[in-house]
Amino acid sequence: MRKTLPVISTGIPSGASGGCSTPQPSPARPGIPRWRKRTLRIALVRHHDLCLNTRQITRVQKRAGVLPHLGLGYIHRALKSAGFHQVIQVDTPALGLDSEGLRKLLADFGPDLVGVSTTTPGLPGALEACQAAKTTGAKVILGGPHTEVYASENLVHDCIDYVGVGEGITIMQELAEALEQGENPEGIRGLVTREHDGGAAPMVNLEDVGWPVRDGLPTDSYYSIMAPRPFTTMISSRGCPFKCSFCFKQAVDKKSMYRSPEDVVGEMTELKERWGVKEIMFYDDVFTLHRGRVREICALIGDTGLKVRWEAPTRVDLVPEPLLKAMAGAGCVRLRFGIEHGDSGILQRMRKESDIQKIETAVTSAHEAGIKGFGYFIVGWLGETKEEFRRTVDLACRLPLDYASFYTATPLPGTPLHTESVAAGRIPADYWDKFVQGDFDSRIGYLVPDAQQRAQIAYRSFFLRRSMIKPLLGHMAVTGQWRHTLDGLRSLARSTSNTDRDF
């Protein structure tokens, strides 16, 4: 099993499990003129990812929204640029399709190649998609963050022909070209087969790829409980240099890449003018990592007169007051802060590189600048006491936050938290190994016995306060998300269960 990968991987050390010698660069292919219309039919699929190992309360997750899959959109753009025009994106959560509905759609399309993206917890749904794709006679490739840790292990499933590791944009394009020309695809960097391990494909600059393809997607079905419709997502940068112990990063995530302010604002303008988007969620790892670039984006938004709401994720140590004012003036309505916990000791164990004072200063400064705050928190941490948990709830309620999300600590494979949890005897060392092989019968253990109950308590303590009535009414009036918000609040008010089915 792959445990660690360098920033730009050229293969797995030969001593590592599942490894092989460093792959050589792919030989130059004869190539087909880009103006020629290629005939290969390709489907890019995201299937449902709600499963027993979600870190979020299922009732909350189901109402939080359905976001576009940007990765598939960028792969689609790269394929289209290479001359592959018979490409569709199939987003079953947005389309409301079950596995049988997906199978029928693919059968009608008749794909030659199907790419399925997944995370490790979402593997059950991804395998359903692969099985549906295989019934059409197509070649099937599995990709996404999951394959950075588990690559060849996925090939135990007969419905998977290839596994893509690293940059799917280049892997899919090269694989499609090889299949169309009748060539053996082995040797493609980042492609793993039953006979060959191609290491990991390196990151590409998204600005060189072009904007993700959105045509043909069920745009009316995408929404966020936080935003008015029409709504969408975009990405302005890639990568995160920080090393939080609960976060899994692909190799391509460990190197930062920034799109130019002109390219970012250009896409924002298209989303506003062509698609009528009212709010954009930036899906960067850390939007304000390069603060000078963010100031340039804000200035360009002002210069062009673009009027669109947007929100972004950041860290509490990367939002100085002058930057917050510039962002608010450029249309930023919300910042999503990775606060994580209210206990200083646990913050250190999480490797957050922040403290309570920084948290309070950042959230308060954003509030004073007119930007709403969304706080992410993790409860049920390894060894978390009830007093430490209570500090998290108290901090969330004390801060001028308009929204909060409380996740249960889940030791994902390839993370320090997983290593520590195994060492502490809280989870079996081979849980994820068996999970990848198809053992989906039981959830990975919580790190404290009442973790799920703590998440419920935290949600109810935060949202069912009297002081939240006015902000929630204002939120629903601005976004129009009355039904999803009220349904979520009713679920929290009625939820007293302490069973796995609520998580």
Image (cartoon, rainbow, N blue to C red):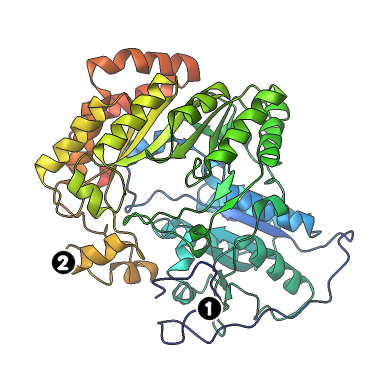
Residue under numbered circle 2: 425
Q: Position of residue 402 (x, y in %)?
A: 35, 24
Quarter of the image with the N terminus is bottom left
Q: Check disc 1 and report its element: helix, strand or loop.
A: loop
Residue under numbered circle 1: 11
Query: On screen, 385 above or below 191?
Result: above
Quarter of the image with the C terminus is top left
- Direction from residue 418 to residue 119 in the image, left or right: right
Q: Image quadrant of residue 342?
A: top left
Residue type pointed to by label 1: Gly
Q: Nearer the viewer, residue 163 or 9?
A: 9
Q: Check disc 2 and report its element: helix, strand or loop.
A: loop
Q: Residues within 10 Å of mark 2 (few under 14, many from 20)?
A: few
User: In this rendering, does residue 91 appear at all?
Assistant: no
Identity of the residue drawn at 53% across and 72% down? 9
Residue type pointed to by label 2: Gly
Q: Are marks 1 and 2 in contact (CB under 8 Å)?
A: no
Q: Nearer the viewer, residue 133 or 245?
A: 245
